[in-house]
Each structure stands twice: as structure tokens, then as C-alpha cells.
Image: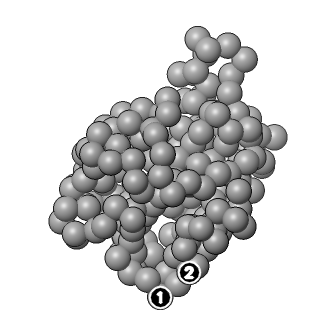
Amino acid sequence: MYLIVGLGNPEPRYLNTRHNMGFDVINELSKESNIKVSKSKFDAFYGMGEIKNKKVILVKPQTYMNDSGTSVIKFKKFYKISNKNIIVTYDDMDLELGNIRLKAKGSAGTHNGMKSIVKNLNTEEFTRVRVGIGSPKYKNEIINYVLEQIPRREREILDESIKKAKDSILEILENGIDIAMNKFN
């Protein structure tokens, strides 16, 4: 079984923000696989089903970004999911707008949602699918940048990135992380 987690913030005001790329990727997976992410458990919305002949749980934590790990660890423990079968997708300011990057493991970097997951799982060994959102001109603008509404021109670019991220997760499920990294990185 795979646990596929998209990071974001709950509440309608965060729907069209850069920090909700993970939720957007889960929404694309949900649509394509016809798995409704509408059940509620462990401080998250989730849905269960099958993608590429693999059992999956699609998860959107509702804890707010900085506490995402508390939801992830509850799913991991309850369903006895191996770290190698956890895939987390999220926004990344260190990647240019429109790029995606897959990693089999690594540090949380500056992303608070990832810091929470690494801390709760007590490991850096799980798969990441990062969606590049670019960075603000000045470091003191970071919070506003990730939480402001996305301009239309940028939204079009991000929509393509979200589809690529969704496709990369399908590739991971079908052929593994190494082949997916070779194809999408």
C-alpha cells in the first residue's frame, strides 16, 4: 500500500495559493483515478483506491502546513505503511516556476511542512515530488509570496507542473522511483 500525501493549508482562502501545490496534485490524482478524497480521519481528508494496480491512500492533511507530519505519522502507523511507500508532494521555492523534481530521500530544506514530516517519521527516507513555484524577489516577502493568490499567467504554468507531478507519481507507482527520476528530473 502507498501513502500519497499532498501538502497544503485548509480553508478556502488558501485554494489558489503557491503553498497548496501538494493539494492540487492530489486533486489531479483523485480526478484521474476516480478516488474521492472526501473521508475524514487523522486530521486529514483522504480517499482509498487503486492506481496502476497498487493500493493507495490519497491524503490532504488539514493540520495546516507546519504540522503536516502529525497526520502523516498516524496514517503510516495505522495502515503499517513502509517509508519506501510514502510519497509526499509539495511546493518548492528552490525550484524555478514550472519545474518539478523527484527525490528518493533527502533533507526537508526550508519547507516547514517537510520539516514536520521528517520529524514525525524520524527519517528522511521517503519519496518527494516537488513542484517549483520560484521565489520572491526579497526574502522578507516569503510568507506573502507562498500564501497570496496566484496570478493568471503563473497559474497556467503551475497547472502544467501539477499535471507533470501527477504523471510522475503514476510513473513511480508503475515503474519505481529510479525510472521516474530518470524520466522527469
Q: Of the residues shown, which amino acid type is indicated by label 2?
A: Glu
Which residue is more in the foreground, 78 or 46? 78
Label 1 element class: loop
Q: Residue furthest bottom?
A: 53
Q: Disc 2, disc 1: CB below 8 Å?
A: no
The furthest residue to the left: 78
- Give the number of the mark in front: 2 or 1: 2
Query: Which residue lies at the image location 56% right of the left edge and 54% below the top edge?
Result: 103
Q: Is residue 90 above or below residue 46?
A: above
In the image, is 94 to the left or to the right of 103?
A: right
Please give the name of the residue rendered at 59% of the width and 39% of the height, measured from the top-left corner: 92
Q: Amino acid at mark 1?
A: Asn
Image coords of residue 172 (percent x, y): 56, 71
| Position of residue 143 measured from the top left corner of the image (x, y, whole percent) | 53, 22
Viewport quadrant of the N terminus:
bottom left
Mark 1, Cα crowd under 10 Å, few <14 / some 14-19 / many 20+, is few
Residue 148 seen in this snapshot: yes
Left or right for 7, reference 167: left
* Residue 100 image point, x, y percent: 68, 51
Name the residue that disc number 1 marks.
53
Q: Which residue is mark 2?
A: 174
Tell me the quadrant of the picture where the C terminus can be found.
bottom right
